[in-house]
Amino acid sequence: MTVKELCEKLGGKLLTQAGGDNDITCGCSCDLLSWVMAKGAPGCAWVTVQTHMNVIAVASLHDMACVICPEGLMPDENVLKKAEEEEIAVISSGDTGYAICCKMHEAGIMPER
């Protein structure tokens, strides 16, 4: 599944031009950056309420497919610019993190093992 396809399933908004065609291989939900740094995986769709620059750094470290911001959260323009540079897609969804994870599971996106 691509980021654009997931964004459509979530009823979300793709906030970046780059990364929409990234393939998603797994998903995770975590707000503790050190945990994601230790457990992240390439192609991951990461759900987090964090919206600052370090999120993009961690996503880039693992070549993640996208970052998903729940409950309508929106990173600022500098964060989105860095995401573009790193080709990390950023999605904003009005759903809760839990609802996003449920929809990802229904779409066949599983956690990295």
Image (cartoon, helix red, strand yellow):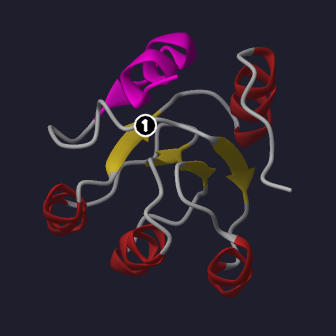
Please determine whether, in this image, residue 25 is positioned above or below residue 2. below
For the point 54% across and 28% down, the residue is 94
Residue closest to the eye, 31 or 104: 104
Please determine whether, in this image, residue 60 is positioned above or below residue 68. below
Looking at this rendering, what residue extends furthest in the bottom direction? 34
The location of residue 21, given as percent across then percent down, is 30, 30
Is 39 covered by the magenta stretch? no
Tell me which corner region of the image, top left, top right, bottom left or bottom right, holds residue 98. Answer: top right
The location of residue 95, given as percent across then percent down, is 63, 27
70 with respect to 103 (left or right):
left
Please determine whether, in this image, residue 6 is positioned above or below residue 47. above
Q: Which residues are magenta?
A: 1-14
80 with respect to 66 (left or right):
left
User: Mark 1, residues whose alpha carbon is within 10 Å: few (<14), some, or many (≥20)?
Assistant: many
Tell me which corner region of the image, top left, top right, bottom left or bottom right, holds residue 109. Answer: top right
Looking at this rendering, what residue extends furthest in the right direction? 113
The residue indicated by pointer 1 is 92
10 with respect to 87 (left or right):
right
- Amino acid type assigned to the residue bearing label 1 in the image: Ser
Name the element at disc 1. strand
For the point 25% across and 60% down, the residue is 83
The location of residue 1, given as percent across then percent down, is 52, 22
Residue closest to the eye, 2 or 95: 2
